[in-house]
Structure formats: C-alpha cells, structure tokens
Image (tube, rainbow, N blue to C red):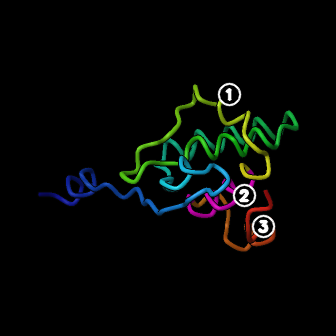
Amino acid sequence: MSTKEKLASLNDVKVTPFPVPEWEEAGKGLHLRSLKGKEWTSVLLKIVECEKQSRGLDANIWICLYCLSEPDGTRVFSDDDFPILAEKNGATLSWIASNASVFAGLKGDSEAKKSSKKNPG
C-alpha cells in the first residue's frame, strides 16, 4: 500500500470525553471532536461571517454544532440544528466553544485560558 493510500484510509479525527453538567443526563455522554479540513474551513467562514454581523454568540453555536460529538466521533448536531442550540444557555455555549476551539485547533490554548478556565454558567 502506498503512502498516499495509507493516509487516505487513516481516520485522524480525534475525540475526547467532554461532559456538560448543565445539560443533565444528556450532557454526560458528550465528546469533543477535532475537525476535518473541509469542516475547519466551513466553521472559520461561519465565524468570520458572524463577526462581520456582530453576532458573536452565533459563532459559538457554530463551533458547538461542529465539535460536539458522540463517542465514535460523529457529530451530535447538523448545520440544520442551529435553532436547537440557539435556545441553550449562552454562558454554557461559550464555555463549550472555548474548549472546543482549542481542541479543534481553531485557537491556541493561551487564548482559551484568557476566556475561561471553567464553566461560568
């Protein structure tokens, strides 16, 4: 098998447990997942668009939509589920997005530490 074939068949998406206590029983089984290249680009474009329109919390929602996962790394939410998360606690979404951003490589660890070390919600 060539190097290209080996890389093509490799699943390098990383997953880590990330319970969200504010979401009670449903939040216990959540995980964070890293992003695939095309997902990373999509999330960054959505963040830039939200910032242009002064909708910072919406950027957090997009990060959560893409990074919250099942244990096997599949997304919990699709893009169409934006309204579901838009109804959740903003402080909780901000805490999740801050941690997910670091895990997914969207921002560095030092930036996240400035944002929040623990969930303010």
- What residue span does the magenta drawing correspond to? 94-104
Magenta highlight on residue 96: yes
Residue 98 found in image quarter? bottom right
Give the alpha-carbon distance from disc 1 to disc 2, as whole Å: 18 Å
CA–CA distance in space, label 3 to label 2: 7 Å
Q: Which amino acid does the dot numbered 2 rest on? A: Trp
Left or right of 115? Residue 100 is: left
Question: Amino acid under label 1?
Answer: Pro
Residue occupied by mark 1: 83
Give the residue type at disc 3.
Ser
Is tag 1's residue or tag 2's residue first in the polypeptide sequence?
A: 1
Residue 39 is left or right of residue 87, and the answer is: left
Of residue 107 and residue 96, the one placed in the foreground of this image is 96
Q: What residue sits right under mark 3 in the picture? A: 116
Which quarter of the image is occupied by the N terminus? bottom left
Q: Are marks 3 and 2 in contact (CB under 8 Å)?
A: yes
Say left or right for 91 vs 82.
Answer: right
User: Which of the two labelled residues, at mark 3 and mark 2, occupies the earlier sequence position?
Assistant: 2
Helix, strand or loop at mark 3:
loop
Residue 95 marker: 2
Q: Residues within 10 Å of mark 2 (few under 14, many from 20)?
A: many
Kindly give the residue lying farthest to the left in the view shown: 1
